[in-house]
Image (cartoon, coloured by chain):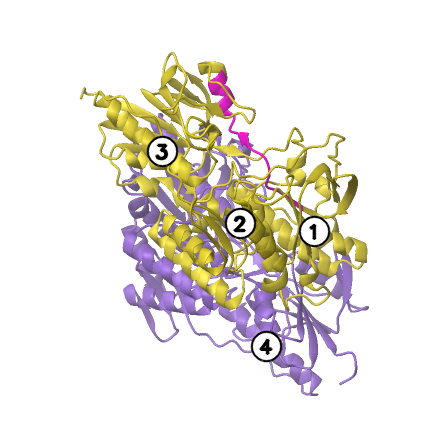
Chain colours: A yellow, B purple
Amino acid sequence: MSDAPHRVVIVGGGFAGLYATQALRGAPVRVTLIDRRNFHLFQPLLYQVATGGLSPGDITSPLRAVLKRQRNAEVLLAEVVDVDPSAHRLIFSDGDLDYDTLVVATGASHHYFGHSEWQRLAPGLKTIEDATEIRRRIFLAFEAAEREPGPAQRAAWLTFVIVGGGPTGVELAGALGEIATDTLKHEFRSINPAEARILLLEGVDHVLPAYPPELSEKAAWALSGLGVTVRTNALVTAVDAGSVTVRCGETTEPIATRTVIWAAGVQASPLGRVLAERAGAPLDRAGRVMVDPDLTVPGQPAIFVIGDLAHFRHQTGTPLPGIAPVAIQQGKYVAAAIRGRLAGRAPAPFRYRHIVNMAVIGRAAAVADFGRVRFDGRLAWFFWLFVHIMNLVEFENRVLVFIQWAWSYLTWNRKARLITGTSPFPLRASTDSREETASAEKIVTIGGDENTSNEA
Amino acid sequence: MSDAPHRVVIVGGGFAGLYATQALRGAPVRVTLIDRRNFHLFQPLLYQVATGGLSPGDITSPLRAVLKRQRNAEVLLAEVVDVDPSAHRLIFSDGDLDYDTLVVATGASHHYFGHSEWQRLAPGLKTIEDATEIRRRIFLAFEAAEREPGPAQRAAWLTFVIVGGGPTGVELAGALGEIATDTLKHEFRSINPAEARILLLEGVDHVLPAYPPELSEKAAWALSGLGVTVRTNALVTAVDAGSVTVRCGETTEPIATRTVIWAAGVQASPLGRVLAERAGAPLDRAGRVMVDPDLTVPGQPAIFVIGDLAHFRHQTGTPLPGIAPVAIQQGKYVAAAIRGRLAGRAPAPFRYRHIVNMAVIGRAAAVADFGRVRFDGRLAWFFWLFVHIMNLVEFENRVLVFIQWAWSYLTWNRKARLITGTSPFPLRASTDSREETASAEKIVTIGGDENTSNEA
């Protein structure tokens, strides 16, 4: 070891980046973890924040608190805008930092298929702010319906459209079904929340397209039990402030709705494009970096790309899904590879060990696919609960989330449903700030989000 | 009883309005509770959200959930903009509603002594959004200091100024002292958070001016133990993005700081002025309604004003403080008065029964004043904890807050310190959006917030 230890800079404090940092504990390196946010987000439970079941603080952990006892690690709040591979330098919006090894783990978001103007009308679910905005829209819609005298407008307020039938879309739709039929029961005087119409739109012919067909069927069946209408082979052709236009086969139908949630498509973080320009990284159509078998950028052994931003196809010929277990295993692999290199060993190629694909549908149903073993129903639900609670980074969060779940389960309540942010008055025009029509002629296919969801 | 029951309309779902609504349970009336927000906020713990100890969901309860089993009550999300006493009609920004009896309980906020331009620079602590904004500024200041190379600028990031030495100011200062010395210990690599300078400015000659002098002294002593510098007889003469100017006696001193929090003054809700114009209600200098002994507006027996918006001086010759126990007792009184009237009885004048004034200073110190009995230190702290937890409206919140407190107490951690909202990059200019100088020549006295705080 020289006086200046090898400097590893990791960009992104999600599953991939945080696990890579932690797996470098005790290694003869200096690790700098950079994120734009000061917390790690447990994304698999983000839909619970969007539907009022949990608070943002329950599914986030301060990065500094998580790493405070790791002596070789530091945390930096910064926004990376560029990289200079020849100088081994990372450029921030307000500074720069040199590295010996760079690990990029900045993830992906939803893709609007060339209609970025739909984002305002139909928010996706990737950040805490997305979740509280969706929560605001959901609970405000019921409030507006309660005060709306016109039957057609009232029905539009009580219609919820979720675009994309991957795990996130299925989980959101299930939670919305519960809210309408159980949580809000007896709480309104003019409307019956159970009359809400919840539509889940999926572009291919079944929900959870990445799962075995039998589990897709069970999921669809569980959703219909919660009052969710699943429309498969459904293509969204336009989104505006008062409606979504859907084409199913030959028929095109406008659906009057005030609440649209987007859970489709994969769009890699902008750092993918930076790596393409500066380091010659090959990108796939979603903007993800096509990495080498050791997760480095081709021709750039000092730059690793892991997690949702990485497109890794060496194992199966198709890209690994954008889920938490892949990100975690890649994070740990990179840490081992860096340790090995410093000890003079070349790393073996990365191999993903499939454990389980899961999705939860409402209060007591879930599907789980272990490859050889598949199960559904209440047992899968308890298993899903257990896995998610045990994977929360902080012990305190585990306890709090467990209590809130137990309590919600017993009382059917969702306590964290506060409407915050922009003033919603007058209620009837509360979404008129997004009145500008963002429709388009182009027809796009609605994909599930199997590549961006983060089921642990 | 006629077919159309007596209609009671209550504006404001704080302590006064919510307790009035609940105390009308089973009465032969139809109650409509109107609020701009869909939740009741437990304001005495709002400073815990502002300092990352609790999540917004922990100290709020959905009004609909609280009242779902009260058959004679309904909740309406609306913004009241006007009232027509001759027609017995309330006017919303988007509709109207007739009443037989009106109860106005819309509270008060902080007063900037004619410098409303300071509000942006030095946010007060009245709403959930205020709390998350203050939280954002506090934790971002430490992040910016960590990345700041210049010693003077770094010191400005590490200087926190709290204006107003009432209970809210004292509690915020104590929590900030804990954050700097305990919570953030070992979490930074370039700065030592314990070097943060926390200044509490109070206009008169001691903090907690509404408390007995011996408890004020104990509070000042406990604050200094947490590293808080208390400046009494301190007058703020200017606030701008990089500094606060303070006059103490003869000397005027600018203090370089990037974080100023306002906890001074009382400014009644705008509905006070509406009642003055429409119903001839007399107002005090803070805009509060000077109510009759039965809490009605003079000459308007159908209109009650309760809580922080009411100025009630019939008992002691001075206005009752703006604290939760007063609001709760007034809410219950109004409900009893309405029941009595419907039964043909004239109500006896309202009388406030003093129970306790409390303030907490950091981890294990508090002061409590029961009138004849006063105590401080750890015993007062446990008592404060017990009273606050037991007064949370929902059972689940009590359990969650208790666990979080126990956990914070054992680990010194504060988990809910996520920085959310506006993007903070570049960090060094993160408050430059408030760069416009809002200084002024006029010298104002800093009052404590004893009339607006909400100690239960």
Determine which quarter of the picture holds residue B294.
bottom right
> What SS does tag 2 mark?
helix
Image: B19 above or below A456: below
**How many angstroms separate mark 4 from mark 2 (CA)?**
51 Å
For the point 54% across and 65% down, which residue is it?
Answer: A412
Tell me whether circle 4 and circle 1 mark residues in contact (CB < 8 Å).
Answer: no
Residue A264 position within the rendered picture, expressed as x and y whole percent measured from the top left: 60, 38
Left or right side of A96 for B349:
right
Q: Which residue is mark 2?
A: A215
**How many angstroms separate mark 3 from mark 1 (CA)?**
46 Å
Residue A276 position within the rendered picture, expressed as x and y whole percent measured from the top left: 49, 17
Under mark 2, the amino acid is: Leu
Provide the chain ID for the residue under circle 3: A
**How many angstroms separate mark 1 from mark 2 (CA)?**
43 Å
Label of residue A331 in the image? 3
For the point 75% across and 32% down, which residue is it?
Answer: A440
Residue B373 position within the rendered picture, expressed as x and y whole percent measured from the top left: 34, 74
Determine which quarter of the picture holds residue B371.
bottom left
- Between B390 and A378, the residue placed more toward the observer is A378
Left or right side of B173 for B36:
right
Number of marks:
4
Label of residue A425 in the image? 1
Label of residue B23 in the image? 4
Provide the chain ID for the residue under circle 2: A
Answer few, some or many: residues within 10 Å of disc 2's Cα (few below 14, many 20 plus, some between 14 and 19): many
Under mark 1, the amino acid is: Phe
Answer few, some or many: residues within 10 Å of disc 3's Cα (few below 14, many 20 plus, some between 14 and 19): many
For the point 69% across and 87% down, which residue is it?
Answer: B343
Task: Name the residue at the top extreme.
Answer: A86
**How many angstroms separate mark 2 from mark 3 (CA)?**
29 Å
